[in-house]
């Protein structure tokens, strides 16, 4: 996510809500632009054709084992203050405080 802070609307550790599908989740990584394969884009984005030159987010989906890769235009902040339940949370975050997850600190 280097150099992306000013461009990205959502940050690592922020809870988000998918506008059309309705799931909640937490951002675990941000790509400045689309970084998946052309085949994936054609299969998953054929109808909507979201911009490739805007940020895309890796999101852990609440209440499941799924992760998604989603364009910024499909997300909005999740201001519920409720924690996200996902089996991989501990791999990415140390704690949940003030409605936000805090990234794991590097081991010394």
Image (cartoon, rainbow, N blue to C red):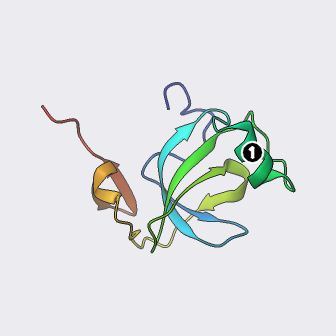
Q: Is residue 13 above or below residue 19?
A: above
Q: Is residue 103 left or right of residue 43?
A: left
- Which residue lies at the image location 67% right of the left edge and 33% below the top edge? 33
Compare residues 42 and 106 and report the one nearer the observer: 42
User: Residue placed farthest to the right in the image?
Assistant: 47
Residue 54, image x and y in percent? 71, 37
Residue 13, compared with residue 22, is above or below; it is above
How would you rate the neighbour count of disc 1 (Cα within 10 Å): few for under 14, some for 14-19, many for 20 or more? some
Closer to the camera in the image, 62 or 95: 62
Residue furthest out toward the front: 39
Direction from residue 63 to residue 10 in the image, left or right: right
Whether residue 9 appears in this view of the structure is no
* Quarter of the image that includes the C terminus: top left
* Residue 77 in view here: yes
The secondary structure type at the circle numbered 1 is helix
**Residue 93 percent coordinates (x, y):** 31, 52
Would you name the residue on which mark 1 appears? 41
Give the camera-side residue of 106 and 39: 39
* Residue lying farthest to the top in this orientation: 3
**Residue at image location 39% in from the left, 58% down from the top:** 100
Q: Nearer the viewer, residue 98 or 30?
A: 30
Residue 43 lies, in percent from the top left, at 77, 52
> Residue at image x 74%, y 33%?
53
Tally of numbered discs: 1
Residue 74 coordinates in the image, percent (x, y): 71, 57
């Amino acid at each position: 996510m280097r150099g992306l802070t000013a461009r990205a609307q959502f940050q690592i550790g922020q809870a988000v809500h998918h506008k059309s599908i309705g799931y909640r989740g937490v951002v675990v990584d941000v790509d400045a632009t689309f970084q998946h394969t052309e085949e994936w884009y054609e299969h998953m984005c054929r109808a909507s054709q979201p911009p490739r030159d805007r940020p895309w987010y890796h999101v852990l989906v609440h209440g499941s084992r799924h992760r998604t890769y989603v364009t910024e235009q499909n997300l909005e902040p999740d201001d519920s203050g409720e924690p996200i339940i996902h089996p991989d949370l501990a791999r990415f975050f140390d704690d949940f405080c003030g409605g936000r997850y805090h990234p794991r600190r590097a081991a010394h």
